[in-house]
Every structure is written in structure tokens, then in C-alpha cells.
Amino acid sequence: MSNLFLDVDNDHDLVSHTSPSAHRRVILLLDMDCFYAQCETVRLGLDQSVPLALVQWNSALAVNYPARKFGIKRGDSFENIREKSNGECIAIHLPVTTIASLSPQKSYCKTYDNSGADCEDDDKERTGRNVRNEGKCINDDIRKADFDGCKKSDPDGTGVLVPPKKQCYFDGSCQGGKAIVNDDDENTDKENFEYVENENQEDDDDFQSSKAAYEKEFNQPDNIREEMFMKERNKMRSPKEGKACLDRYRLASARIFSLIEETLAETIGKKKFILERASIDELFIDITAFCYPESNTQNDAKVNANAAEDNEELVSSTQFLSNIESDSHQSWQETIKCHETVLHPSDLDCELGRALRLGCHVARTVRCTVFETLGFTLSAGISTNKLVAKLTASYGKPNGQAVVYPSAIPKTMEETQIRKARMLGGKMGKKVQSLLPESETTMGAIARLLTLDDLIKAIGDESGRWVFDACRGICHEVVRPTLKVLPKSITAFKSFPAVTYPELNKWTVITSE
């Protein structure tokens, strides 16, 4: 954690949430809404209002907001999903890299009819029949009816889908052992990166190849999407088949991040923002250089001295700025102002207030572009540092945005649970919580009840000083450019009972794919 404490002001007694040295930056946190589930919604051409759960084996891995209204949550089994939604929630299984792909043997998976009887269903040829249990499998006619039940009246032939009207059948309950809900990206997405010095070394051919791969995965014709829906809907997979594969979601993440970078370069200029990939579905953006007039003047002078490429960038940025007064009004209207009642008019009209307002407009511009181009919704948090920006994003969910001004930070901290704060969801957060009365569970409680000495004695000097700042909404951690960064390591693993060596060898091969 030592990298979190760079550039920290050690004079904590003089730093407060209103100190100019503590709050001058404009930081955005963009968070893709229910990312894994949303990937399947976009890939299958479903409307965003269709309840959907992404499952791994017999356990819900991700649940979108419409499905959450039924009380469905992560870890729910197929049977729980069916019962809670009365069959209205669609279940899509995580992609599986199968053992069959490494051998000529066919891969089979179980499906269930409404009576609970199972049958062998060829993974490649979904005939809807079973030669040993005739009539027991869910057939393609029913799956076709299910898909039609999700379609919206569509005179223009756009193929937009809407929630089914009690026509979504669930293939039945799934019995078996407890599924391992496991995000293989967990280790990859943290701060285990190696910076690539030459930002121009990215191969354009690789980018085009990645873009083409995204198009192939997520922009199939309507008839192909219909076939995929009928084949994959409520289909059970067995852990014995293979290993869960997240390639589809990494592909979507890379495409979205790339589009965000392109949009910012075209609107505010390449030199006026810094992007940091926080996880597969989160991105920090520092746009301080764009949001302050003196920064714009300095950067524009540099751009004017450069070649044609930079001049083109200046024209694009100038066009964005020329319309910003009129365009930013709608962005401001659509942004939630957290704890607005504590704000003074001077908070909005000062230099920082105007900078944050620009930040709101940039955030909305990016969100609209991603939705219009790729169909994904994002939520955004706008504030003066990474810690508060991440907390702020939760106020805008789903598909919205919020801003927290420095004057509103104490209120925000008073209602933020310690375990919800960035870097405090694990052991350190539990340790800090143990220092407080049981009834006090918020970041604000730390600021009110614990001194700097208390924290240093409990968790050490470095961590103690960081928590002392964090509970007051102060975070000096900089946004570091990581889009041009390569992971130092990638972890892939599979959990299973004891197996023989030949079987283990297969799993060794499949996890290395």
C-alpha cells in the first residue's frame, strides 16, 4: 500500500476538508453499471430493462438492476432466481472454456424441463430432442416463443427487446454442489502493472483486430442474436465441463476504455486528461488541466507551437469549448448535487465550483458517447480526489452522475460505511472499526472519535495518517496513466476435488489457455 501515500502533506493538524491544498483537482470516476450482466444484455440485443442474472455454475455472479427488484442477489441459485422472479428473470451462464476444445470428444451439458428431469444436450447441435428421454428436453420451439415474448413491437425492424410479459420460462431447478463464485480478473485488475514508456508503441493493427473482435462478439445480426438467446437462455453448465472464461468481458472493457480515451482526445485535447484503469469496469480520469482557465491557456500555447496533428486537436477542443456554456446547462441539470442544502452560492461560483461544473459536463459527454456508440450505460462520480469521486459515483447509480463539493464532504463521510470506502473493505477497515463503538460504523465516526495517535498506534504510522485524511475526505493519491500499461502477471485457477494425474494434466492445459 505504500504507493498510496505519495505526496502526502504530513501537517495533518492544518489540513481540513476546506483547505485549498486539499481540494483543487477535478477527478471523475466512471463505473459501468452491472458490467458483467450488462455485457450479456448488449451482446444479446436485449433492452436494458430486461431482468438478467449472469451465473457461474449454480450461483449468480452478477445481477442487473431490473433483476434486483425481485430481491435476486449475488450467490443465488438457479432455483432461487426462478422463484424470486416468478420465472421472469433471464439467466445467462458465464462462457466456459471446455475440455472438449482440447480433445475430439463432444461436450455435453445438462438442461432441465419444467418437471426437473434432465437430459443430455449436445453443445453444438441443439435439436431440442433426446434419444433416451424423448420429450423431456426444453425444445427450440419453446425457446423461440421465449425470445418472441421478449421482443418489443417493432414496425421499423430494429429488433429492440423489452421485458417479457410472463412468457419467460425457466428451464427448471439446478441441483448439485455449491458453485465457486470467482472473478478471475481480481488479481489482474489491481496495481500489479508495469508502465510502458513509449506511449506510441501500441500497434494499430492490434487495435483494429481488437475492435473487429468486439464487433464480432457484440454486434451480430438480429437473427444470430436470436439464435444465441435461444441456445444460451437458462442453460445450466457443469464445473466438470471446463473453466469459466472472462475474455468476452475483457474485450468489452478494452473497447469501452478505448472509446472513452478517443472521446476525451477529440473534445478536450490529448494533453488535458489522465486515465487510470481502476478495474475491469472502473476508470479514474483527472481533467484538472482542462477545467482551469490558466491551464487551458498554457496548453493551448503549447498546442499552437506543435505540428498539424496538435492543431487538429486544438480545433476539436475549441469547438467543444465554444458550445460549453449552452451544452453544460443540461449536464448540470442532470447531475445530482450531493447534500445540496449545505452548499453556499459561493461554492458554486468560485473557481473550483466552475471547474467541477465543467467536470460534470465532460462526464456526461463521455457517458452519452459510450451509450450512443456501444449501448453501455455508465455512472459517474465527480469530485476533487479519487476517494470521494468513487464514493460519489454510487449516488448516481444506475446510469446517472453525481458531484460532491468540498463543503458537502463531511455530510458524505457521515453516511459512508467504513467498509464501503476505497481501501477499507478488508482487514484494515475491520481493524479501524474495532476501535469504535459498535453503533458507530461510518467514516465520519472515525473523524469524530479517533485521533491521529489512536490510528497510528492501531495500524501504523503510514496507514494511520492515510486513514486520518481519508475519513475527512482528503486523498492525495494521484491519477496515474495505466491504459498503456501491461500487467506483470495474470492469474488463472480452477477449484475441483481430487483427481488423477491424466485429469489434472487436462486442467493444467486449459488454465493456461
Image (cartoon, grey):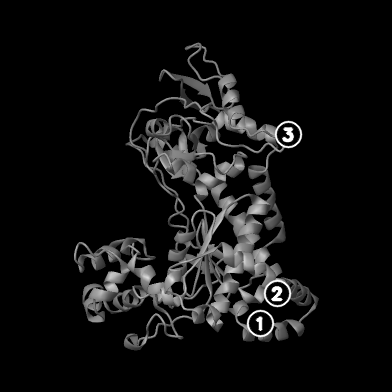
Q: Which mark is residue 296?
A: 1
Q: Position of residue 321 (x, y in %)?
A: 70, 74
Left or right: residue 109 versus residue 309 is left
Q: Which mark is residue 155?
A: 3
- Residue drawn 36% across and 27% down? 175
Q: Which sits in the foreground, 385 or 506?
A: 385
- Spatial separation of the CA atoms under disc 1 and disc 2: 10 Å
Q: Which sits in the foreground, 502 or 443?
A: 443
Left or right: residue 449 versus residue 100 is left
**Mark 1 or 3, closer to the camera:** 3
Say what secondary structure mark 3 lies in.
loop
Q: Residues within 10 Å of mark 1 (few under 14, many from 20)?
A: some
Q: Which sits in the foreground, 80 or 19?
A: 19
**Mark 1 or 2, closer to the camera:** 2
**Mark 2 or 3, closer to the camera:** 3
Q: Amino acid at mark 3?
A: Pro
Q: Residues within 10 Å of mark 2 (few under 14, many from 20)?
A: some
Q: Which mark is residue 421?
A: none
Q: Residue 153's image quarter?
A: top right
Q: Residue 12's image quarter?
A: bottom left
Q: Position of residue 473 (x, y in %)?
A: 39, 74
Do the CB atoms of the residues marked 1 and 3 lie less than 8 Å apart? no
Q: Earlier in the sequence, mark 2 or mark 3?
A: 3
Do the CB atoms of the residues marked 1 and 2 lie less than 8 Å apart? yes
Total number of numbered discs in the rendering:
3
Left or right: residue 177 versus residue 134 is left
Q: Which residue is mark 2?
A: 321
- Spatial separation of the CA atoms under disc 1 and disc 3: 48 Å
